[in-house]
Structures are given as structure tokens and as C-alpha cells.
Image: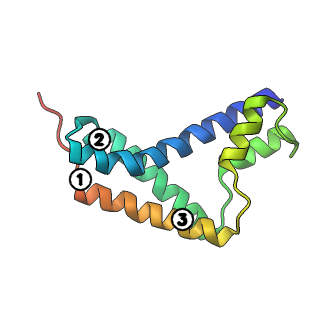
Amino acid sequence: MPWLADGVLAIHFAIAAFIAAGLLLIPVGALRGWAWVRWRRLRLTHAGLMVFVAAEAVVGMTCPLTLIEAHLRGTEAPSSFWGFWLQRLLYWDLPPNFFLLLYLICAVWALVLWVKFPCKAPQR
């Protein structure tokens, strides 16, 4: 089922893009006065995902989405154009220690953003 594997890959890529974009847009948006970067649900989701990714790296766990995708593919390469490029963007051929350090730095940054740019209660 390559199309289903491509769907899992697209979701995985969207989550990674959300986390990466948040690490940049939250501080920029807070400094520029963008109200949406202080939405509690958005920030909880962002920080929670980043901490989960870092915790996976610390314990040496493979991401569940990676496992699901590999199972659906039977470890075969993506058969679609989008699957090929999303896989190339998402999976880097670097040592595991690189990712451990990267994810820990990003998790700390997400928590720093939480403290430095706190969420505001919605106005009624």
C-alpha cells in the first residue's frame, strides 16, 4: 500500500514542519505582536511534540510514524513523486548522536519560548 505509506509520510512531514516553523515563528511573532503565537493550545501542542521527539531520541526509540511507514512500505522506496521528495526532506543520513543533540537543543528552545513568551488568556 504505497499510497497509504505516502500518507503517513506526509503527516510525519507536516508534524516536523509544524515543529520547525514554531521554533522560528513563536519568538518572531511574539516580538512582532502576533496574537496567535501565544495561543495556549498551539503552544501546548508545539512544546509537547518537541519534548516527545526529544524523549524518543534520549531513550533511543524510533518514531512510531517511521515504523508505520516502513511497515506499510515493506521497507521499499516511495513509489510516488511526493513520497520520494518528502522522504528525502524528512530522513537525513546522519549519525544518531547528531539527532539526539539537535532534538534536545530544540526541546530546550521550545521550553525557553514557553517561559520567555508566555501564553495569554483569550480575551472575552
User: Which quadrant would residue 61 be assigned to in this image?
Assistant: bottom right
Horizontal side of 73 relative to 21 (left or right) equals right
* Vertical side of 99 occupied by 85: above or below: above
Tags 1 and 2 touching, CB below 8 Å: yes
- Residue 117's tag is 1
What is the x, y in percent for residue 68? 73, 43
Viewer-side residue, 73 vs 36: 36
In the rendered image, which quarter contains the C terminus? top left
> Could you tell me the amino acid type at mark 1?
Phe
Element type where label 3 sits in the image: helix
Horizontal and vertical percent position of residue 28: 30, 47
Q: CA distance from mark 1 to mark 2?
A: 9 Å
| Residue 17 against residue 99 in the figure, above or below | above
Comes first in the chain, label 1 or label 3: 3
Residue highlighted by disc 3: 102
Query: Amino acid type of disc 3?
Result: Leu
Q: Tell me what residue is drawn at x 47 percent, y 54 percent.
A: 50
**Residue on which the image places disc 2:** 37
Q: CA distance from mark 1 to mark 3?
A: 22 Å
Pinpoint residue 11: horizontal percent, then vertical percent.
Answer: 61, 35
Q: Residue furthest left?
A: 124
Separation (CA) of disc 2 from disc 3: 23 Å
Instruction: Name which residue lies at 44% across and 61% down.
Output: 107
Type of residue at label 2?
Answer: Val
Residues tagged 1 and 3 counted as in contact (Cβ below 8 A): no
What residue do we see at 22% from left, 52% from top?
118
Dot 3 alpha-carbon crowd within 10 angstroms: few under 14, some 14 to 19, many 20 or more? few
Quarter of the image where the N terminus is located = top right
Query: Helix, strand, or loop for circle 1?
Result: loop
